[in-house]
Image (cartoon, rainbow, N blue to C red):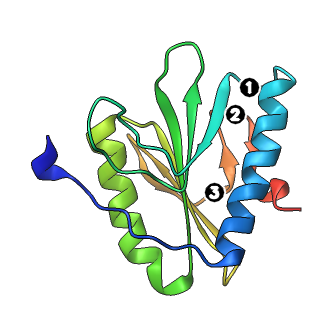
Amino acid sequence: MNDNLIIMGVNAPRIHQAIIAKLIYGLTDLYLKSHSQLFPYPETMIDESQTSPAPDLMLVNSETDLTKVIIEITHTQGVKKDAQKLQELMQVYDIPEGFIYDYKLGIWYKYDLQKGQQKENPSWCDAVGVDLAKLLF
């Protein structure tokens, strides 16, 4: 499995980290108020049993320990490369939903494991039932 390892690059400008913090805050609030069973983890390995990629944010079912959503925060020049990595991670780790947020242009991209890119309501997270864009206060 390690021969297919995807290395996620370090991208830690303040704006990048601030967006992750805002998403963590909003998603944790939903979890604590029992509006979601998915707990948000920042920059955490997908598979704890071996060295594995660590997306910017992942939402994990607290009962099954399965990752249901991954989110990558990037800038305009990184969207294409991150989209390829995101889709590959979704396939390898069987993750149903993935998002990329281009913080330079304020654009969301949504991916479904079965259907590919979803252009309608690209910031709507089905797994949580929330518009991720609204968490970026």
Q: In which quarter of the image is residue 32?
A: top right
* Real-space CA distance between mark 2 and mark 3, rounded to the nearest whole angstrom: 17 Å
Which of the labelled discs sits on residue 127, or is there none? none
User: Of the residues shown, which amino acid type is indicated by label 1?
Assistant: Ser
Q: Alpha-carbon distance for marks 3 and 1?
A: 22 Å
Q: Residue 58, how many percent across, how many down?
A: 55, 43
Inter-mark Cα distance, 1 to 2: 6 Å
Q: Label for residue 36?
A: 1
Name the residue carrying label 2.
128
Whole-percent x and y of residue 94?
Answer: 34, 34
- Give the residue displayed 45% in from the left and 36% down from the top: 96
Callout 1 secondary element: loop
On screen, residue 1 versus residue 73, left or right, reads left
The N terminus appears in which quarter of the rendering?
top left
Other residues around mark 1 within 10 Å, as few (<14) / some (14–19) / many (≥20): some
**Corner quadrant of residue 75:** bottom right
Give coordinates of residue 119: x percent, y percent.
57, 61
The residue labelled by disc 3 is 120
| Residue at the top extreme, as displayed | 63
Say if mark 1 contacts mark 2, CB within 8 Å: yes
In this picture, is 68 found above or below 88? above
Q: Is mark 3 on a helix, strand or loop?
A: loop
In the displayed structure, would residue 38 be above or below residue 117?
Answer: above
